[in-house]
Amino acid sequence: MVATDNVYKTPEEATFNLALYLKKRQKLCDTALDQAIPIVYPEKIYESMRYSLLAGGKRVRPILCLATCEMIGGTIEMAMPTACAVEMIHTMSLIHDDLPAMDNDDYRRGKLTNHKVYGDDVAILAGDGLLALAFEFVATQTPQTVDRARVLQVVARLGRALGAAGLVGGQVVDLESEGKSNISLETLNFIHKHKTAALLEACVVCGGILAGASSEDVQRLTRYAQNIGLAFQIIDDILDVTATQEQLGKTAGKDQRAKKVTYPSLWGLEESRLKAQELVKAACAELEPFKERAEPMVAIAHYITSRNH
Ligand code: GRG
């Protein structure tokens, strides 16, 4: 049995304790993110960046990045700068998504959205600042013991996942689809493969690359991540219908009010849940060659379908 720290099986713990694992990893990520952005002149922009970055959040993306790196045989230290970068990128995408020109939301992570506190102008710049810092952080903070060719691959993968071939492309199709009730499953899948799954895929694959994953491993990791990425979005859509604003930390029931086509609106809640579970099963099958080392990644995949916020 491989012990990365004592949240792994101990004699007292017969089974892997996911809640404890997530709590410890969240704390590690929160500390690293806090240290990543000191407040200097001009204070307002750093405060605005920190406001959203440190507002909570499940930290699923950085935790996946660290977990993959460890599963492939790397260390937390090797992947922490990339883990911080993916959370900075995710946060910037939320700040921009919440702007009046996009989803126009007032609450995120249980707090007022960035633009509600700092204004649209500073919120746009806070997103830009986080995006730029993410790449700087990977390039300058990844330990020198990690082969620079791997770091370069990570930078390229992240860039691709975010741009028009990834998040940006997904967001554009999402905006174009607003108010249309005849959106096909193909278009819905395109939106979420790009808006949601592309970044989750980058988190997993980059964690693997930093640890020296083989090309066969990278292919398995890619399929794992694409499956959990879609499952994540299906559950996100379900929670928009079933969870409260307090649970979500953001406005609930928004999709229905905006008459948005979602997985539950196409398939119904029960069928959507089943599809998410099938995707998680397929994701976990990809991890079989990694045996017990895959335990956290398997548990995280199941957490995605069982979460209530
Ligand atoms: C990336 C350059 C660049 C621009 C951004 C605005 C935009 C382009 C894309 C929108 C992407 C977006 C908001 C996707 C939704 C993803 C999603 C399911 C978010 C919810 O993630 P959780 O539940 O949230 O992990 P927490 O708060 O826990 O981190």
Image (spheres, rainbow, N blue to C red):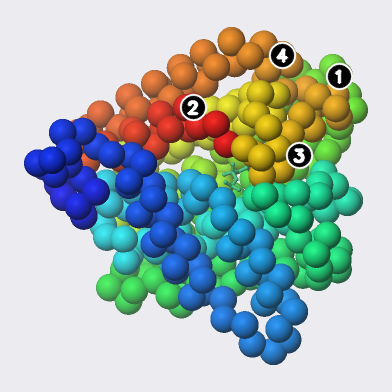
Label 3 to label 4: alpha-carbon separation? 21 Å
Amino acid type at mark 4: Leu
Badge 3 element: loop
Residue matched to label 3: 251
Residue matched to label 2: 305
The residue mark sitting in front, 3 or 4, is 3
Q: Looking at this view, is 160 or 202 the one in front?
A: 202
Badge 1 element: loop
The residue mark sitting in front, 3 or 2, is 3
Amino acid type at mark 3: Thr
The crowd level at tag 4 (other Cα within 10 Å; few <14, some 14-19, many 20+) is some
Label 1 to label 2: alpha-carbon separation? 26 Å
The residue sitting at 61% across, 59% down in the picture is: 55
Mark 2 / mark 4, whichever is N-terminal: 4
Q: Are marks 3 and 2 in contact (CB under 8 Å)?
A: no
The residue sitting at 80% across, 64% down in the picture is: 117
Q: Residue 72 at x, y = what percent? A: 26, 48
Q: Report the label total.
A: 4
The residue sitting at 56% across, 76% down in the picture is: 37
Mark 1 / mark 4, whichever is N-terminal: 1
The residue mark sitting in front, 1 or 2, is 2
Q: Residue 122 at x, y = what percent? A: 81, 70
Q: Would residue 94 appear left or right of 270 to someone viewing this image?
A: right
Mark 3 / mark 2, whichever is N-terminal: 3
